[in-house]
Image (spheres, coloured by chain):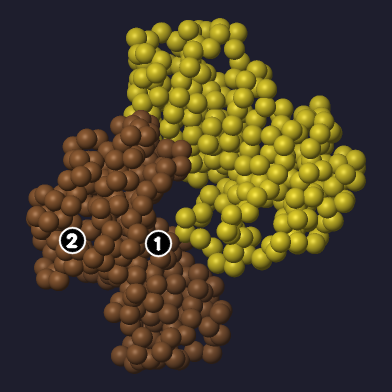
Chain colours: A brown, B yellow
Amino acid sequence: MKILLHLSYLGTNYCGYQVQPNGVTIQQKLNEAAKQLFGYDCDIVGCSRTDSGVHANEFCATVTKKKENALYTNIPTDKIPQAITHWLPDDICVFAAEEVADDFHPRYDVKYKEYVYKIWNSPVRDPFTQGRAWHCPKRIDDEGLERMKRAAACYIGKKDFCSFMASDSKVEDTVREVFDSELEREGELITFRVRADGFLYNMVRIFVGTLVDVAYGKIEPEDIPKIIEQRDRRAAGSTAPPHGLYLNKVSY
Amino acid sequence: MKILLHLSYLGTNYCGYQVQPNGVTIQQKLNEAAKQLFGYDCDIVGCSRTDSGVHANEFCATVTKKKENALYTNIPTDKIPQAITHWLPDDICVFAAEEVADDFHPRYDVKYKEYVYKIWNSPVRDPFTQGRAWHCPKRIDDEGLERMKRAAACYIGKKDFCSFMASDSKVEDTVREVFDSELEREGELITFRVRADGFLYNMVRIFVGTLVDVAYGKIEPEDIPKIIEQRDRRAAGSTAPPHGLYLNKVSY
């Protein structure tokens, strides 16, 4: 039996998802909690790597006994979320668990992933979205939002998104299919939602940085297809900060 | 000129609003920021006292030069929010400022105040509402929510709310008029919203504790009028914790 965990976390206090030599990570906390709960070392394999400060409304990871392809436990699967969450810090929780096939892989089997990015658009910062949204103080008016929407629509489709990948990334196949890319405003909060079969490194953050440049008139919405065609990181806009980004949904 | 500040804060790290000998308070932080901005000691008078851990989406306070009834500054009123927020910690911000009459009093002139109370109703706790909602793990089903709504409606009207006041409170006039009292569920989040001309000490928290007792069948919705009639704190339900409570609106 292999178990897939569905978790959510506030990334503020972590150096991203993946275990690394310096700094506390989500994966490390999951490892520690799994060992406490099951009584032996475990392998935790995640659906992706999120950066330092990035959050997750839904992140998926399998848990198995270390170096084996199964988990051995008497705990009923539906009781695992509460049981493992007991051993996790307040800013990480497992809200669901399910049995998956032995050959299931949480990264390779992903059909699509959805990210949301939150922008706090108000002259004054907000205590409740601090560390949870990007504060853009300069007002984005209705026209600015319309421009952003027109630009966001240009991201949809199966395209080479090389211009929207961090320049130090070594990935060679830079073609991804974006299914949805949309914006909505609710009061001072602007939310960007994007769904794709996969994402390049920093892709969503460069999508958003570019959209904000479009809102403020630095880039025209009609330039987006040309930016994509150029296959050059320098053609796109800035990289939005990590703390507005949420992995929102993972579908298998 | 007297200035009324509209602020919001996350109460988690504070011992409530009011300055006190032990522990950091919102009022103290406002005092420090006002002194930095205006260059002299100020009097800050708030619209109410919020308890330790209670939050505010809108809290109002006047600022004047200490022992005087006016504020002397060259800063245009519409620039004060950003300017004073610069001197405040991340979890407090002033989002609006306006000039008010010399005889204006932020506490006595209140027409109504609105509070919201958030309940996270899921077996597993949630990283994003941690410290921002009361976690009630036992499922409240549709029938339970209907019971809560029926009970909440009984709070509306001009009544003696003595049963819903902390037993150590010394207030003598315990009659208040409640204008609205309603509940809504959005996913796993249940929000209680109540508007009144004034509130007794712990009144909203006892309202909510009682509603949750109603949801779980410990109190019948039809018992609320009798509980009010008894004028005895012991007749009502438990006191909900402070961290789900938000002062939401103050109207003059």
Q: Position of residue A131 (x, y in %)?
A: 36, 48
Q: Residue at x 58, y 40 (%)?
A: B246
- Local packing at callout 2 (Cα closer than 10 Å; few below 14, some 14-19, many 20+) is many
SS assignment at label 1: strand
Residue beneath disc 2: A161
Give above or below for A103 relative to A228. below
Q: Position of residue B180 (x, y in %)?
A: 72, 37
Q: Is residue B24 visible?
A: no
**Which subunit holds the residue at mark 2?**
A
Location of residue B74 by image quarter: top left
Q: Nearer the viewer, residue A42 or A228?
A: A228
Give above or below for B202 relative to A24. above
Q: Nearer the viewer, residue A156 or A17?
A: A156
Location of residue B229 by image quarter: top right
**Which subunit holds the residue at mark 1?**
A
Q: Amino acid at mark 2?
A: Phe
Q: Position of residue A54 (x, y in %)?
A: 32, 57
SS assignment at label 2: loop
Residue beneath disc 1: A248
Determine whether, in the image, residue A239 is placed left or right of residue A86. Answer: left
Give above or below for A184 relative to A15. above
Q: In which quadrant of the rendered image does the C terminus of chain A lie? A: bottom left
Q: In which quadrant of the rendered image does the N terminus of chain A lie? A: bottom left
- How far apart marks 2 and 1 lie (CA) works out to 21 Å
Q: Nearer the viewer, residue A208 or A2?
A: A208
The disc at residue A41 is none
Q: Nearer the viewer, residue A104 or B197?
A: A104
Location of residue A245 by image quarter: bottom left
Determine whether, in the image, residue A201 is placed left or right of residue A130. Answer: left
Q: Amino acid at mark 1?
A: Asn
Nearer mark to the viewer, of 2 and 1: 2
